[in-house]
Amino acid sequence: MSVNYNIDLTENEYVHFEGKTLNELKDFLYPDRFLDCCGYINNNGKSIALVSMKEYGVFLGYSDGESTHLSLHNKNTLDKVVDVWGDGLYVSEGLFIPPEIAWQCICEFVTTGSIHYNIEWISPDDIPEGGNYIE
């Protein structure tokens, strides 16, 4: 299994992290210390885009090269966007899930390459006008 991650913290001067193991990801993505960050985790041609923001939770966008699935927490706030970097990178507020659930999904993805089915996933086609996501 070939896992790589590439994460930028959006606080503390945009510190950049790269690595290959789940234990390394725990340093900044474990549920009790999820730091504000944005990045990607890759596993054998599949990827998860992630955005973590303390006040909203964690957005996850899974892609296997053929289809994309977006984490869903609240479909009523998909048209409201959050400015992730403060410079125009927007993600729909309703796509942010609790950190504990996001961590379960990240662990499943890193260990198996699959997405966690205990959360609700939607298609990019389900994002209304005014909403947004990253892939």
Image (cartoon, grey):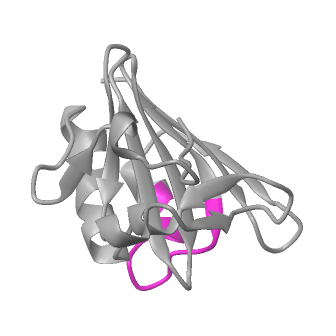
Which portion, as a residue range, is magenta? Answer: 25-37
Magenta segment includes 26: yes
Furthest toward the front, the residue is 129
Residue 50 or residue 106, whichever sits in front: 50
Magenta segment includes 118: no
90 left or right of 48?
A: right
Can you give x and y, in whole percent of width and height, for residue 4 in the image? 50, 33
128 left or right of 133?
A: left
Q: Is residue 61 above or below residue 87?
A: above
Give me the residue at 36% from left, 19% from top. Answer: 44
Give me the residue at 32% from left, 54% from top. Answer: 71
Give me the residue at 21% from left, 41% from top. Answer: 115
Q: In the rendered view of the protein, which quadrant contains the N terminus?
A: top left
How many marks are shown on the rendered structure? 0
121 left or right of 26?
A: left
Q: Quadrant of residue 52?
A: bottom right
Can you give x and y, in whole percent of width and height, for residue 97 in the image? 35, 69
101 left or right of 135?
A: left
Can you give x and y, in whole percent of width and height, for residue 86 in the image? 82, 66
Q: Is residue 13 above or below residue 130?
A: below
Q: Quadrant of residue 94?
A: bottom left
Give me the residue at 73% from left, 52% from top. Answer: 89
Residue 111 or residue 56, whichever sits in front: 56
